[in-house]
Image: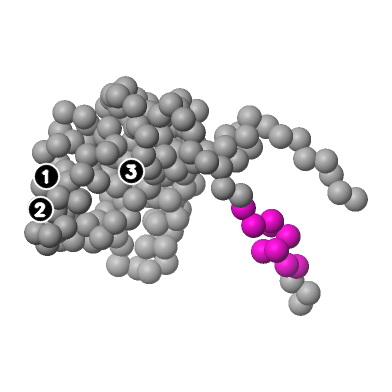
């Protein structure tokens, strides 16, 4: 017997959340807002309660200098493009993860960090704070790790681009779950 699904506020936020890549308005993203969102977001599931993340906030006042430093890590012919790209959001939240020696713990740490980022994204969406998780090539560059003072035992998981928006991005559909679902017949 199929149950009728009752939509909740959380389900609505999950379905409406979008990546906001452009179209940010001038409202500044504050450190206080980001910290308040993180206070709730860090309640994500985390194996062994390791909480394998740390955060680096780049606010509107530091953004231009930060963009210049990161752009300088690219070949000269790409620097202007990267500088413009990195100046689009109002602020950044860089998420850094502890990298253990054990592959199982690495996978668990990454899963926990990704869950925390999703929590942050949903909480930000409630406040019309646009978010997009970026994994551009610079997150793998040792020079960028140095700029961010990330250690050898840390991984930059992504640059979270932040900015308030006036218009929601276009909603893209999802493949029906029935097309991705099977039952083990063992």
Q: Which residue is rendered at x = 56% and y = 42% of the image?
A: 171
Q: Is label 3 in a helix, a strand or a loop?
A: strand
Q: Which residue is rendered at x = 30% and y = 67% of the image?
A: 101
Whether residue 65 is situated above or below residue 135 in the rendered picture: above
Lower position in the chain sequence, tag 3 or tag 1: 1
Whether residue 154 is situated above or below residue 163 in the rendered picture: below
Q: What stretch of residues is rendered in magenta?
A: 174-183
Q: Which residue is rendered at x = 38% and y = 42% of the image?
A: 21
Name the image quarter holding residue 86. top left
- Residue at numbered disc 2: 72
Q: Which residue is rendered at x = 27% and y = 32% of the image?
A: 90
- Residue at numbered disc 1: 68
Q: Which residue ends up furthest to the bottom in the rendered image?
A: 186
| Magenta portion: prevailing SS class | loop
- In-front residue for pair 47/143: 143
Q: Between marks 3 and 1, how big is the CA–CA gap?
A: 17 Å
185 with respect to 28 (left or right): right
Q: Is residue 179 visible?
A: yes
- Residue at numbered disc 3: 160
Q: Nearer the viewer, mark 3 or mark 2?
A: 2
Dot 3: within a 10 Å radius of its alpha carbon, few (fewer than 14), some, or many (20 or more) residues?
A: many
């Amino acid at each position: 017997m199929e149950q009728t699904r009752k939509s909740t506020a959380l389900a609505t936020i999950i379905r409406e959340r979008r990546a906001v890549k452009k179209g940010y308005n001038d409202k500044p993203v504050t450190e206080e807002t980001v910290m308040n969102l993180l206070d709730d977001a860090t309640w994500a599931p985390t194996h062994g309660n390791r909480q394998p993340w740390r955060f680096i906030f780049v606010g509107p006042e530091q953004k231009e200098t930060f963009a210049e430093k990161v752009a300088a890590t690219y070949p000269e012919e790409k620097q202007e493009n990267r500088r413009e790209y990195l100046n689009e959001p109002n602020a950044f939240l860089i998420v850094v993860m502890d990298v253990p020696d054990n592959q199982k713990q690495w996978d668990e740490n990454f899963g926990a960090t990704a869950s925390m980022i999703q929590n942050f994204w949903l909480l930000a969406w409630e406040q019309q704070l646009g978010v997009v998780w970026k994994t551009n090539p610079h997150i793998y560059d040792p020079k960028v790790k140095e700029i961010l003072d990330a250690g050898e035992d840390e991984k930059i998981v992504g640059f979270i681009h932040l900015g308030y928006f006036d218009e929601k991005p276009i909603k893209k559909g999802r493949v029906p779950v029935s097309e991705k679902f099977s039952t083990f017949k063992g």
